Amino acid sequence: MERVRFLWQSIKNFKEMGTVIRSSPAMCRNMVQYIDSRNDLIIVELGAGDGVITKYILDKMSKDAKLFVFEINPELCEVIASIKDDRLILINDGAQYMESILLKYEIETVDTIISAIPFLVLPENLTKEILNISKKILKSGGNFIQMHYVKNISKMYKAIYGNVEINYVALNIPPGYVFRCVKKEV
Ligand SMILES: C[S@@+](CC[C@H](N)C(=O)[O-])C[C@H]1O[C@@H](n2cnc3c(N)ncnc32)[C@H](O)[C@@H]1O
């Protein structure tokens, strides 16, 4: 049922969704592999869709951690809201507003950011805005994790973070890539 709702929302809002099929278990596992269960206490997920990766993040994080989930689609937020977990804070708003929204929770820096926002179909200025804010709020040494279906976008991440590691995930439709950038210590 969740799959059908995701497909329908994808067809209606393709310019925000960028795909019609949600991430596979293999993709979800790859995305959460860098979470440091002991030390990552504030985790942010961007573009959660119906929460398919959200569940894997919650499984991996510690009981004291908090997960802030940003998703712009209200119908998909209804699906995410059915995940009952006190550590989950669902925000039905754009990732471009995350800095000011997190400040309302007295959060200035975050430990890890996991994103499935389809930057390739978003306006370039919005993509840059979200990526710059992400780097700004990420702690030194923190991970920025992003999925894409193409590899040739890696230059953009290298330019922002000075490093990028890429994992190929064959068991996904279509096969995709997980990009991992680490914010250098300053
Ligand atoms: C490719 S789907 C990924 C869904 C799910 N995380 C997955 O991996 O299957 C991208 C999601 O990003 C959301 N999105 C697009 N622009 C956004 C923005 N500016 N802020 C937050 N979410 C956004 C879309 O509504 C969509 O649900």
Image (cartoon, helix red, strand yellow):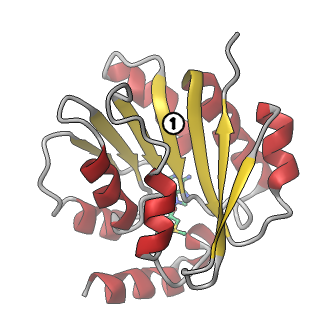
| Quadrant housing residue 4 | bottom left
Q: Which percent across, then down, holds residue 105?
A: 31, 22
In the rendered image, the quadrant that contains the N terminus is: bottom left
The residue indicated by pointer 1 is 97
Indicate the position of residue 79 as horizontal and vertical percent values.
Answer: 25, 68
Q: Residues within 10 Å of mark 1 (few under 14, many from 20)?
A: few
Rendered image quadrant of residue 152: bottom right
Compared to residue 72, the image places residue 131 above or below, namely above
Give the amino acid type for the residue marked by disc 1 in the picture. Tyr
- The picture quadrant where one finds residue 49 is bottom left
Name the residue rendered at 74%, 64% in the picture: 120
Q: Position of residue 176 (x, y in %)?
A: 65, 72
Residue at x-position 82% and y-position 53%? 154
Q: Is residue 106 above or below residue 18?
A: above
Q: Residue furthest top?
A: 186
Residue plotted at (64% across, 41% down): 130
Residue 180 appears left or right of 89 = right
Residue in the image at 86% along x and 37% along y? 159
- Residue 133 appears left or right of 39: right
Left or right of 171: which side holds 55? left
Q: Which residue is more in the foreground, 85 or 96? A: 85
* Picture layout, residue 185 above or below residue 127: above
Q: Secondary structure under badge 1?
A: helix
